Image (cartoon, grey):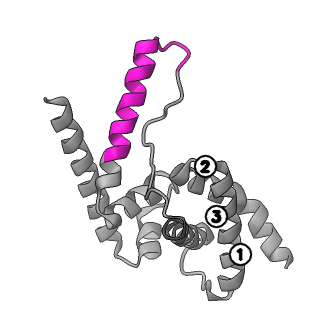
Amino acid sequence: MEDFEKLYKEYYPRVYAFLYKLCHDREMTEEMTQDTFYELYKSLHKYNGSCKMFTFIASIAKNVYYKHVRKKHVEYIDIELLSEIQDSSDTPEEACLRKMRSKEIRHVIEMLPRNYRDVVVLRVYADLAFPDIANTLGISTSSAKVIFHRAKKIISEELFSKNDL
């Protein structure tokens, strides 16, 4: 039990941040974080050390998120790749443009196939290395890299075509 408490204290902030970046709702994030650690407690015996502990926990958190989305009929995923934090030197116009660009990126990411979205989320928000992403999703490391680069290409092309009009 002491070991689990150490895991909880060490990984709680990182799991919370990961889930918050997906749903942007503090109450829902708190609930999903608790569910993640409950599921971790139940399945800790399955951890075999073949991946980093956070990779194992991120996989559980991702599944908790998907389960929660299905159960609550919530909008699928809300990812922000660009910070909406306003720079103090931004003019109101610059701040508005930054926010609009961020919404465009979120919209494009939401349209990606689920396997592409999963890789982008784990790479950008969980800050996982490609071998850890591969382990989490049950794919090869090279597949994770290819999917990530294809997703970036799709995002770039889509944003470029929107701005080209």
Which part of the image, by quadrant, shows the N terminus?
A: bottom right
Q: Which residue lies furthest to the front in this view?
A: 73
Q: Main secondary structure of the magenta part?
A: helix
The image position of residue 66, as x and y in percent, is 49, 68
Rendered residue at 60%/86% (across/down): 48
The answer to whether residue 145 of the structure is visible from this angle is no
Disc 2 residue type (three-letter):
Asp
Cα gap from disc 3 to disc 1, whole angstroms: 10 Å
Is residue 89 rendered magenta in the image?
Answer: yes
Please state the extent of the stretch shown in magenta in the rendering: 87-107
Rendered residue at 45%/43% (across/down): 80
The residue singled out by tag 3 in the image is 32
Q: Is label 2 in contact with label 3 (beta carbons under 8 Å)?
A: no
Disc 1 residue type (three-letter):
Tyr
For marks 2 and 3 on the same chain, the one whose residue lies earlier in the sequence? 2
Q: Is label 2 in contact with label 1 (beta carbons under 8 Å)?
A: no
Is residue 149 rendered magenta in the image?
Answer: no
Q: On the rendered structure, is 17 left or right of 91?
A: right
Callout count = 3
Cα gap from disc 2 to disc 1, whole angstroms: 20 Å
Compared with residue 26, is residue 9 higher up or lower down, i.e. above or below? below
Q: Closer to the observer: label 2 or label 1?
A: 2
Cα gap from disc 2 to disc 3, whole angstroms: 10 Å
Q: Label 1, secondary structure: give it.
A: helix
The image position of residue 112, as x and y in percent, is 29, 57
Q: Is label 3 in contact with label 1 (beta carbons under 8 Å)?
A: no
The quarter holding residue 49 reads: bottom right
> For the residue carrying disc 3, how many other residues have a C-alpha within 10 Å: few (<14), some (14-19), or many (20+)?
many
The answer to whether residue 156 of the structure is visible from this angle is yes
The residue singled out by tag 2 in the image is 25
The image position of residue 141, as x and y in percent, is 35, 70
